[in-house]
Amino acid sequence: MQMLEKDYLADMYRDPYFPDFLVDKIKTLLKEVVALLESGESDLEVIQAAFDKATIGINELEEEFDDNDSEIETAARESIGETVDLILVHYKVAIDCEEAIREREW
């Protein structure tokens, strides 16, 4: 069963401080990990590499957030973390949430 759209970054979408088009970019990065999981991938190293790639991609959005009078701050960190945790639980991935987003700079 797939994750629902409403499960992705709900708090960020509710908060006008975060431009939706930038939240969409984060969601796209996380959906790439979900696509890998839905393909049946179970190798934790491969899954962690996908989370690392997504996290680095989120890091690279920081300047774009700044340019739009926003930033990846506490509320964003919590929303991203909650979404990653939902992904890990939903797909029964035995990786700790903090480890999954270990490459974060936010």
Image (cartoon, rainbow, N blue to C red):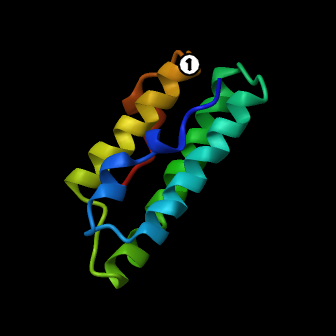
Judging depth in this view, the residue of 75 and 52 nearest the camera is 75
Q: Residue at x 26, y 61 (%)?
A: 15
Q: Residue at x 54, y 63 (%)?
A: 25
Q: Which structural element holds mark 1?
A: loop
Name the quarter where the C terminus is drawn. Answer: bottom left
Asked if residue 21 lies left or right of residue 34, the reply is: left
Label 1 Cα neighbours within 10 Å, binned few <14 / some 14-19 / many ≥20: some
Residue 36, given in percent of the width and then of the height, sits at 72, 35
Vertical comparison of 5 with 73: above or below:
above
Residue 74, given in percent of the width and then of the height, sits at 21, 52
Judging depth in this view, the residue of 44 and 2 nearest the camera is 2
Which residue is tagged 1? 93
- Quarter of the figure with residue 98: top left
Q: How many marks?
A: 1
Residue 20, given in percent of the width and then of the height, sits at 43, 67
> Which amino acid, mark 1?
Val
Vertical comparison of 64 with 43: above or below:
below
Vertical comparison of 38 with 20: above or below:
above
The answer to whether residue 31 is visible is yes
